[in-house]
Image: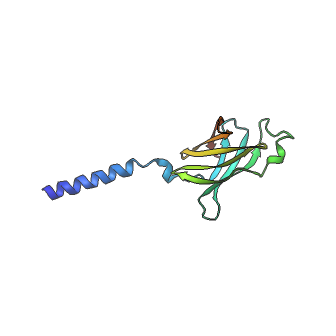
Amino acid sequence: MTAVTGFARATMVGLVGLLSVPAVLAASPAGIWEIEMKDSRYRVELCGDSGQALCGTLIWLGNGADSPENLPYLNTLMIDHAQPSGPGTWKGDLHLYGQSAAGTITQVSDDQISLQGCVLGIICKTYQMFRYAE
């Protein structure tokens, strides 16, 4: 009986361990994402030599963001080969409409990514992106 109880306990510990793994680990960040203001969309993909870096390209502007000042940024990298820094997290350069910042990209869930960009390490802004479903 003790061996069965020990086996059952080990099985339960293993199952609890699996259940506590964040859902982000199972989700891929690849896909089309829309920024919270709903005025731009980005194609996000794993990139780089190892396929572990994160790249995001501006692919659509609308709802007022499609101005002559912003159109030159279409098809340019917003997330520029950010390197993995933990499960569902990448660090690297962010480029938004001609401005660059050191950034942290965190996949919050299957359908949400948080971008935080900081200039000089003290002026920071956070944006939310949501998976776009056509």
Q: Measuring from the top left, give residue 33's x and y in whole percent.
A: 65, 46
Q: Which colour scheme is used?
A: rainbow
Residue at the far right: name it. Answer: 68
Give the left or right position of residue 123, taking residue 1 as reference. Answer: right
Residue at 84% from the left image edge and 39% from the top image edge: 67
Q: Measuring from the top left, give residue 64's x and y in whole percent.
A: 79, 35
**Which image quadrant: the N terminus?**
bottom left
Residue at 79% from the left image edge and 38% from the top image edge: 65
Front-lying residue, 10 or 124: 124
Front-lying residue, 93 or 47: 93
The count of marks equals 0
Relative to residue 48, is residue 63 depicted above or below?
above
Relative to residue 35, is residue 19 depicted above or below?
below
Give the left or right position of residue 53, taking residue 95 as reference. Answer: left
Give the left or right position of residue 75, taking residue 114 as reference. Answer: right
Q: Measuring from the top left, give residue 129's x and y in whole percent.
A: 63, 41
Residue at 77% from the left image edge and 52% from the top image edge: 75
Front-lying residue, 33 or 51: 51
Relative to residue 58, is residue 7 depicted above or below?
below
Residue at the far bottom: name it. Answer: 49
Residue at 73% from the left image edge and 38% from the top image edge: 39
Q: In which quarter of the image is residue 61?
A: top right
